[in-house]
Image (cartoon, grey):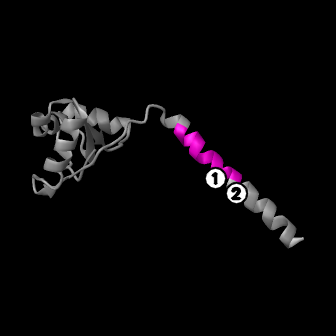
Amino acid sequence: MVANLPYDLTEEKLKELFSEYQPSSAKIALRPIPRFMIKKLQARGEPRKGRGFGFVTLASEELQQKAVSEMNGKEIEGREIAVKVAIDNPDKQGDGEEGDAPAEETANGAEEAAAPVAA
């Protein structure tokens, strides 16, 4: 993951910045905006602005570690970027449900424990 990117940086430019590390892809998280605004921007030929972070997929773990050590803290267009290893999450919904389940159990357990004290 690459954080603190300039908001107008393109995916092509991000991939170019990491070209020394053989990137297979580069993605920039875009700001969420309403669909009618997306259509207006497209009609004007204006790009959507990024959210200030993105992801670069590299060919190997060795290149990944090298990119993290060499690119972390580098200044890009006046901004000091932060480069970290991000782990793919193949099933975001499954993890979210599992993460919610213990919280529900804890809440239920707390309610049950509180009931006898109040009675």
Q: Is residue 47 visible?
A: no
x 44%, y 31%: residue: 90
Q: Position of residue 82 (x, y in %)?
A: 22, 53
Residue 34 lies, with reference to residue 75, above or below; the image says: above
Say which residue label 2 marks: 107
Which residue type carries mark 2?
A: Ala
- Marks 1,2: beta carbons within 8 A: yes
On the rendered structure, is 33 left or right of 111?
left
x 18%, y 36%: residue: 63
Mark 2 element type: helix
Question: In front: 112, or 63?
Answer: 63
Say which residue label 1 marks: 103
On the rendered structure, is 45 left or right of 54?
left
Question: What's drawn in magenta, residue-wise?
Answer: 95-105
Which residue type carries mark 1?
A: Ala
The quadrant the N terminus occupies is top left
On the rendered structure, is 32 left or right of 26?
right
Q: Is residue 50 visible?
A: yes
Q: Quadrant of residue 119?
A: bottom right
Q: Position of residue 70 (x, y in %)?
A: 13, 48
